[in-house]
Amino acid sequence: AFVVLGTVAFVVLGTVAFVVLGTGAVLLWSSVSTCDKVITVFANIFGYVAALLNVLCYVPQLRRTFQHQGSGSISYVQYGLMGFGGFLSSFFQIFGSKERLTTILSSMVGNSMQCIIIIICAYFDCRNRGRTEPEAVKLGEPKEAR
């Protein structure tokens, strides 16, 4: 439990530090420089790193889902609405405001990870449906405890 909590705290603190320091660096650079190419390069790098951090945020949930082979306390409604709303927002960013790929990439990765998690949970929940109570209790335990 401490390792998972440490991983989550590391990812959250890393994300906050990245956003604060990255935004500060871009603002500082743009105020003292007229070099648009450098700003574009920094923005692209930050976009790719943000997408990577977004993937890392969902790794503990994926791990827990595979350990327990079920959805546990995941809300299908919340993940479904967040994923659908995120894809609508991404659609608008692509076709409406014509944003760059690195601007859209982080939210698209997050939406995709939510959809992957919900599909995996639905698979395990459908597979486990109809099992007897002792089997269902065993399936809710991590594999190491069986």
Image (cartoon, rainbow, N blue to C red):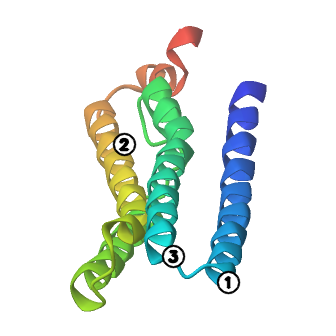
User: Which of disc 1 and disc 2 is earlier in sequence?
Assistant: 1
User: Spatial distance from mark 3 to mark 2, Cα to Cα?
Assistant: 47 Å
In the rendered image, the residue lying farthest to the left is 95
Check disc 1 and give the amino acid type.
Answer: Ser
User: Spatial distance from mark 3 to mark 1, Cα to Cα?
Assistant: 10 Å
Q: Nearer the viewer, residue 75 or 24?
A: 24
The percent position of residue 40, horizontal first and vertical second, equals 44, 70
Whether pointer 2 and pointer 1 mark residues with C-beta atoms closer than 8 Å, the reply is no
Q: For this view, does 28 lie left or right of residue 90?
A: right
| Residue in view at x 26 percent, y 32 percent | 127
Q: Is residue 142 visible?
A: yes
Q: For this view, does 5 lie left or right of residue 52?
A: right
Q: Could you say which disc has been placed on residue 121 in the image?
A: 2
SS state under label 1: helix
Q: Which corner quadrant of the image does residue 104 belong to? A: bottom left
Q: Is residue 19 above or below residue 96?
A: above
Q: Could you say which disc has been placed on residue 35 in the image?
A: 3
Q: Nearer the viewer, residue 61 or 71?
A: 61
| Residue in view at x 67 percent, y 57 percent | 18
The percent position of residue 43, horizontal first and vertical second, equals 49, 66
Whether pointer 3 and pointer 1 mark residues with C-beta atoms closer than 8 Å, the reply is no
Check disc 3 and give the amino acid type.
Answer: Cys
Crowd band around label 3 with a 10 angstrom C-alpha radius: few (<14), some (14–19), many (20+): few
Q: Nearer the viewer, residue 142 or 49?
A: 49
| Residue in view at x 55 percent, y 82 percent | 34
Q: Is residue 32 above or below residue 143?
A: below
User: Spatial distance from mark 2 to mark 1, Cα to Cα?
Assistant: 47 Å
Q: Is residue 20 above or below residue 14?
A: below
Q: Could you say which disc has been placed on residue 31 in the image?
A: 1
In the rendered image, the residue lying farthest to the bottom is 96
User: Which of disc 2 and disc 3 is earlier in sequence?
Assistant: 3
Which callout, 2 or 1, points to the residue nearer the camera? 1
